[in-house]
Image (cartoon, grey):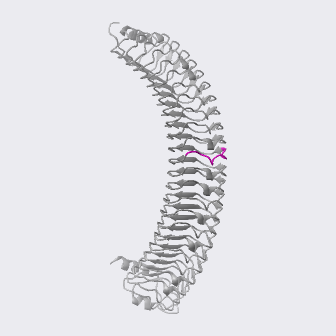
């Protein structure tokens, strides 16, 4: 039994068929001419399914006027006409006409006035028009016209005024116009115009004023403009204009005042203007302007004052200016300005005083300054300024006194100072200053007193000083100063007292002194001093009495002694002193009485074995019971 016969059997089992003409049929399947002639009533109480590979027309149904349920005409490979249904006036449920490859027109439905559910016309490869639906005024559900290869026009739907659900016009490869939808004023559902590769304009929607769930205009390859939507004033949900390769402007949206959801303008390769959106004052969700390769500016958004969600401006390679956002004074979420290769400044954002989410300025290769943010006072999320190779200054952030998350300044190859961050006092999370090749100092952070997270200063090749951190007293996480090859000293940290999670000094090739750490009295984690080949002494750590993690002194090629740790009494974790070629003395550890983990003193070839053994003996006498390795130090000395 093939699938069509099986479907017919199931329908017959589910619905009883009445033979007498004076009884309503409860529901049936029409698969043959005999089934057609057996239906002699005026109404069907349930559903009616026409599914046949034999029938070319539907003669025999001439008495049928009303179907309480759905009418489905599907998978009828020979069906060319709906002749026979010409007296059908009402369908209580949905009308579905799907996958009938030889059906040319719908003239057989010319008396149909009402459809209580949805109207679905889908994948009918020979269908060229819809004139048989000219009397339908209202749909209780949605209108779906999808993937009909030869459908060139929608004439026949002119009287359709009310649609309770959505309108989806999708994948009709020869459709050139939406003429036929001109009667629609309001949609409670959404409107999707997608993947209609021959569609050039939206003129058939000229009366549309209000759309409910969404407006999606997507991947219509021949669409040049949005003319035809001039009366549209409100969309309660999202507006998406995405992937229309020839779309040059959005002028047809000139009456749109409010978008209740998000507005996304993305991947429109020919778009040169947003003019036409000037009446839009508020966006209830996000605004995404993304990957529009020829868009030079945002001038069409001159009326926009409020965005409740995030603002994302991403990957618009020709975008030079944000000046079109000159009225914008509120963003409810993140502000993300990323990978806009021609963007030179942020003018247009000058009314923003607060960002309630993240501020991320990343990968804008021609961006030289941030003065467009000159009124910004607070960033509630993290602040990320990364990989902007032409950025020379952070001026423009000079009013920012609060950053609620991480502050990351990373990979800005022309940045010479942090001037512009001078109002920051208490940073609520981490501070990362990393891979800024021309940054010479941290001047600009002169008011910073507390970093509640960790702090990483890494691979800033020109950084010679940490001056600018001279008020910093507390770091709530780890302090890591790594790979800054020009850094000579740590004098800018002279007020630092508390590091809650450890200190890492590693790979700073010119670092000759740690004198700037003289106030450090509390270290909550490890103390790791490794691969600093100019460091001769640890003088500057004299306030440190306890290390609550491990102490590691490793591969510091110029280190000669441990002077500077003279007040250190307790190490809660391990103590490793290893591979320090010039180390000659451990006398600076004279007050150390406790090591809670392992002890390793090895491969310090100028350190006498007797010095290593003397430290070990003193610790053992004080109660040390851990694993101990004393090896490959200077023999016999």
Residue at the image point whose x is 51% and y is 73% from the top: 144
Front residue of 527 and 29: 527
Would residue 105 be visible to someone looking at this image? Answer: yes
Front residue of 361 and 148: 361
Whole-percent x and y of residue 609? 36, 10
Whole-percent x and y of residue 471? 62, 25
Front residue of 391 and 165: 391
- Extreme-top residue of the structure: 637
Is residue 427 positioned above or below 324 on the image? above
Magenta-colored stretch includes residue 350 = yes
Whole-percent x and y of residue 224? 52, 66
Q: Looking at the rendering, which quadrant does residue 212 occupy? A: bottom right
Quadrant occupied by the C terminus: top left
Q: In the drawing, does residue 190 fall left or right of residue 2?
A: right
Magenta-colored stretch includes residue 586 = no
Front residue of 624 and 382: 382
Q: Looking at the rendering, which quadrant does residue 604 occupy? A: top left
Quadrant occupied by the N terminus: bottom left
Total residue callouts: 0
Is residue 634 positioned above or below 120 on the image? above
Is residue 490 positioned above or below 16 on the image? above
Q: Which residues are magenta?
A: 344-353
Whole-percent x and y of residue 410? 50, 37
Q: In the drawing, does residue 351 fall left or right of residue 576?
A: right
Q: Main secondary structure of the magenta part?
A: loop
Would residue 550 be visible to someone looking at this image? Answer: no
């Amino acid at each position: 039994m093939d699938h069509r016969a099986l479907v017919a059997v199931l329908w017959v089992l589910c619905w009883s068929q009445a033979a007498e003409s004076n009884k309503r049929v409860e529901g049936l399947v029409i698969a043959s001419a005999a089934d057609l002639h057996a239906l002699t009533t005026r109404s069907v109480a349930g559903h009616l399914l026409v599914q046949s590979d034999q029938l070319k027309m539907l003669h025999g149904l001439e008495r049928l006027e009303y179907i309480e349920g759905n009418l489905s005409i599907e998978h009828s490979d020979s069906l060319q006409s709906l002749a026979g249904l010409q007296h059908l006036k009402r369908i209580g449920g949905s009308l579905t006409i799907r996958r009938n490859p030889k059906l040319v027109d719908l003239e057989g439905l010319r008396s149909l006035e009402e459809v209580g559910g949805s109207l679905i016309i889908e994948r009918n490869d020979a269908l060229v028009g819809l004139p048989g639906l000219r009397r339908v005024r209202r749909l209780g559900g949605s209108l779906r016209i999808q993937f009909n290869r030869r459908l060139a026009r929608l004439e026949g739907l002119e009287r359709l005024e009310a649609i309770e659900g959505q309108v989806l016009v999708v994948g009709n490869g020869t459709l050139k116009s939406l003429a036929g939808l001109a009667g629609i004023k309001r949609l409670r559902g959404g409107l999707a115009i997608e993947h209609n590769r021959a569609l050039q304009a939206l003129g058939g929607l000229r009366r549309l004023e209000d759309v409910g769930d969404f407006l999606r205009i997507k991947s219509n390859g021949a669409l040049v403009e949005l003319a035809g939507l001039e009366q549209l004033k409100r969309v309660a949900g999202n507006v998406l204009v995405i992937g229309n390769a020839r779309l040059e402007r959005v002028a047809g949206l000139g009456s749109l005042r409010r978008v209740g959801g998000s507005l996304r303008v993305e991947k429109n390769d020919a778009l040169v203007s947003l003019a036409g959106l000037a009446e839009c004052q508020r966006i209830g969700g996000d605004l995404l302007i993304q990957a529009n390769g020829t868009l030079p500016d945002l001038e069409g958004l001159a009326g926009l004052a409020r965005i409740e969600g995030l603002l994302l401006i991403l990957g618009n390679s020709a975008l030079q200016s944000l000046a079109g956002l000159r009225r914008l004074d509120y963003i409810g979420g993140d502000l993300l300005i990323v990978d806009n290769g021609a963007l030179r400044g942020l003018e247009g954002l000058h009314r923003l005083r607060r960002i309630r989410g993240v501020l991320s300025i990343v990968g804008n290769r021609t961006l030289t300054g941030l003065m467009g943010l000159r009124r910004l006072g607070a960033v509630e999320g993290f602040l990320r300024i990364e990989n902007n190779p032409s950025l020379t200054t952070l001026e423009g952030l000079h009013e920012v006194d609060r950053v609620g998350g991480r502050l990351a300044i990373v990979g800005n190859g022309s940045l010479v100072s942090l001037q512009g961050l001078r109002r920051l006092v208490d940073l609520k999370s981490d501070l990362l200053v990393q891979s800024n090749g021309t940054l010479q100092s941290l001047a600009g952070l002169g008011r910073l007193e507390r970093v509640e997270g960790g702090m990483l200063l890494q691979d800033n090749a020109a950084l010679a000083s940490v001056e600018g951190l001279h008020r910093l007293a507390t770091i709530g996480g780890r302090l890591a100063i790594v790979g800054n090859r020009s850094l000579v000293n740590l004098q800018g940290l002279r007020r630092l007292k508390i590091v809650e999670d450890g200190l890492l000094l590693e790979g700073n090739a010119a670092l000759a002194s740690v004198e700037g750490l003289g106030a450090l009295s509390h270290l909550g984690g490890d103390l790791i001093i490794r691969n600093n080949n100019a460091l001769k002494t640890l003088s500057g750590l004299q306030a440190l009495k306890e290390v609550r993690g491990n102490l590691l002194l490793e591969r510091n090629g110029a280190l000669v002694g441990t002077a500077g740790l003279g007040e250190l009494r307790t190490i809660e974790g391990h103590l490793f002193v290893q591979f320090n070629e010039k180390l000659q003395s451990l006398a600076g550890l004279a007050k150390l009485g406790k090591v809670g983990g392992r002890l390793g003193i090895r491969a310090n070839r100028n350190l006498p074995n007797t010095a290593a053994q003397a430290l070990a003996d003193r610790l053992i006498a004080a109660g040390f019971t851990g694993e101990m390795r004393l090896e490959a130090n200077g023999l016999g000395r």
